[in-house]
Image (tube, rainbow, N blue to C red):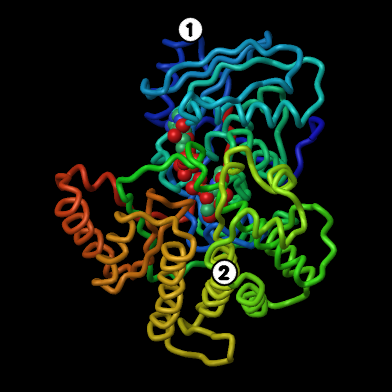
Amino acid sequence: MDGKVSSNAVPVANVPNSDRISRLNKQFFVEFKCNPSFYVKVPGRVNIIGEHIDYCGYPVLPMALEQDILIAARVLNEPKIHIQNIDTKYGKYDLPITNNFGELEIKPDTNGKPFWYNYVLCGIKGALEFFNKEKINGVQFLIDGNIPPASGLSSSSALVSAACLAFMYAQNEIPNKTEIASLCAKSERYVGTQGGGMDQAIAFLAEKYSAKYITFKPLNALPVALPEDAVFVVAHSLAEMNKAATNDFNRRVIECRLAAKIIGVLEGISLDNKIVTLSEVQINLSKSLEEMILLVKKHLPNEIYTKQDICKILRINEQDMDNLYLTPNTKTLQEFKLKQRALHVYEEAKRVEDFRNACSQCRENENGFVNTSNGDVTQNGKNSNKTLNILGQLMSASHESLKTLYECSHDNLDRIVDISKELDVHCRLTGAGWGGCIVALCPKDKAEKYIDTLIEKFYVDYCQLNRSKAKQYIFVTTPNHGAMIYTN
Ligand code: ADP
Ligand code: NG1
């Protein structure tokens, strides 16, 4: 970074004139008795398909939302951090930075749930570790977020990423998008979860009007043109789940690690004691996803594996297993589902490829006709119905797999999926799950009826909400751009 601005740098623009910025300025003055010197904005995201596979090394297909985390910031000449939130339910936090920046402690509350400002500290810790500066400026942050929290729309990563970006800019650094995305993926793990990097990647690499096909190693984001005659509807299940407060998320991560290790070992790959992902094993074996599915069935036939079973296969003792493969919050687990998790991952990775191919095969040419990959030229409407159907089926299959193989759905999510099916609309849970939101692919001409039906049948009848409240929980979304810095 070193002060140079690369062509891939996070964009800097003039401060927009908006009610939200005015409100933030007023509150900033009340809290800190001065004006902010700059702002950063980082969007949430909805993942269209490719769930729980980023941490296994497989590509995913998200898009950025309109909802975001906006930070108003001021640079301080002394090494202090003051963090406040516009929403008073999030208390303030003050920290003098000691000389030893590496010791910024990020600890949860006594119930193991992270404090909200831990996510901000993750971002700052990442930034501090990244550059080697003798003099570090302090910051005052006032945070305003409107991404539904703990709902699979990546509020936590937007908060980590915004804090990291703002802290870097306060040190006069304008980071490169790919570098800061990787840095934030790593630094969010200080909160305790072993995420794969999808959220931070789309937060920085998103572009307006297109979803992104994101690959890891190396990190890259290619545009995906979505069908023009459909919209994506996001609906909240009214159940929230903080990923870092339980071990459900990390359990899945380590189950995938163990499955990868066992397949690798039983296929005779020399892996030492390294952690490998399911995709690294596939690459190492030079097999297709279909062949990997067969290998899962061959090498992982059991419904349940105990710790002893796994140690026996890997020829290690339980202490080695704890130290080499488990996270602090999964060391007490005794039973693991390896076949189910690995099957989901390989099949979901295949669905992402199929989804992307279906999107690219249905491109309109200038004549209003559609060129398909097999050379057929068909009339737009007819072909597009077929594509929507393919995409929809893939989304429904993804949900079914997350529900049965990955066991990360929730009754409310399944209820929304069932109501959607009655209307022939395909949808799936998005984000980590166990609550949160669904994303539905809905033909444009059906969207109004679909939203009305969900309001009536799910929010009003099933959840007993009134209609006007219900409307806050469901929205149509289009792809937004990624993170920005605003200054005058
Ligand atoms: P998500 O799927 O939204 O990323 P997580 O469970 O990973 O959910 O993180 C949610 C947590 O992020 C919240 O419990 C809260 O601590 C923090 N958070 C999200 N949005 C805000 C906000 N606007 N202000 C303060 N903290 C927030
Ligand atoms: P959400 O639930 O939106 O925070 C999490 C992970 C992603 C990915 C998805 C499941 C983090 C920060 N995010 O997203 O990396 O694994 O679950 O696909 O851990």
* Quadrant in which the C terminus is drawn: top right
* Disc 2 secondary structure class: loop
How far from the left and from the top, in percent, is residue 14? 56, 32
As drawn, the label of residue 33 is: 1
Mark 1 and mark 2: Cα distance apart in space? 63 Å
**Compared to 118, does 26 lie above or below?**
above
As drawn, the label of residue 336 is: none
Determine the image quadrant of residue 102.
top right
How far from the left and from the top, in percent, is residue 358? 52, 77
Could you tell me the amino acid type at mark 2? Answer: Asn
How far from the left and from the top, in percent, is residue 459? 21, 51
Quick check: 336 left or right of 399? right
Task: Evaluate whether residue 306 shows in this view.
Answer: yes
Local crowd size for mark 2, using a 10 Å CA cut-off: few (<14), some (14–19), many (≥20): few
* Quadrant in which the N terminus is drawn: top right
Residue drawn 59% across and 65% down? 342
Local crowd size for mark 1, using a 10 Å CA cut-off: few (<14), some (14–19), many (≥20): few
- The answer as to whether callout 2 falls within 8 Å of ligand 2 is no
Determine the image quadrant of residue 375.
bottom right
Could you tell me the amino acid type at mark 1? Answer: Lys
Task: Evaluate whether residue 13 shows in this view.
Answer: no
Quick check: 235 left or right of 133? left
Residue drawn 55% across and 40% down? 157
Q: Which residue is mark 2?
A: 302
Front of the two marks 1 and 2: 2
Work out whether mark 1 precedes mark 2 in sequence or the reverse, and give the earlier one. Answer: 1
Residue drawn 82% across and 16% down? 134
How far from the left and from the top, in percent, is residue 368? 46, 81
From the viewer's side, name the closer residue of 485 and 65: 65
Quick check: 190 left or right of 457? right
* Disc 1 secondary structure class: loop
Residue drawn 45% across and 39% down? 242
